[in-house]
Amino acid sequence: MPTQHPCHKAELPRLNRIIGQLEGIKKMIEEQRYCPEILIQLKAVRSAIVSVEKNILSTHLEKCVTDSFKDQDLAKEKIAEIKELFNKLQN
C-alpha cells in the first residue's frame, strides 16, 4: 500500500529564519562579539530547530503512523521505525 508523505512546507519560513539566525551568528563570530551573546543566539537556534523537529514528528505520527494502522504488518514496521527514530533523536 503506497503512502503519500505529508507536506512540511509550513516549516520553510521557520527554517529560513533559522538560516538567518545562523548567518547572524557567523557575523557575530567574525566581529569577535562577546562569547555569552553568541552562546545565547546558538541556544535560540537549537530551540528553533527542536521546534521544527517536533512539528515534523507530530505530523509523522498523525499522518504516516496513523495511516499505517490500516495494515497490521505496516503498523509493526512503523512502530519499529518510531522506536529507532526516538533512539536517534535522543542523542
Image: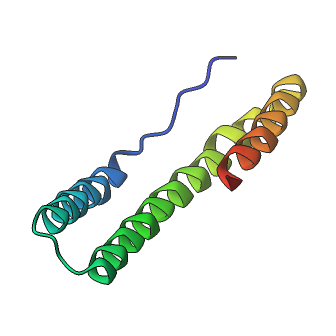
Residue positioned most to the left = 31
**Residue at 69% across, 44% down:** 88
Residue 60: image quadrant is: top right
Q: Return the residue found at the far front.
A: 32
- Comparing 50 with 8, the one in front is 50
Identify the residue at image location x=36%, y=66%. Answer: 45
Left or right placement of residue 3 versus residue 34 in this view = right
Left/right of residue 57 with respect to residue 22 in the rendered view: right
Nearest the viewer among 66 and 20 is: 20
- Image vertical order of residue 72 relative to residue 69, above or below: above
Q: Position of residue 12 (x, y in %)?
A: 29, 50
At horizontal 77% and vertical 39% (from top left) the residue drawn is 84
The reply, left or right, for residue 67 in relation to residue 83 is: left
Residue 30 locus on image (x, y percent): 13, 61
Direction from residue 90 to residue 83 in the image, left or right: right
Q: Is residue 74 above or below residue 55?
A: above
Whole-percent x, y for residue 13 in the image: 25, 56
Coordinates of residue 11 in the picture (x, y in percent):
36, 53
Q: Residue 2 or 23: which is nearer the viewer?
A: 23
Number of numbered discs on residues: 0
Most foreground residue, 35 or 8:
35
Q: Quadrant of the N terminus?
A: top right
The colour scheme used here is rainbow
**In percent of the image, x 84 and y 35: which residue is there?**
80
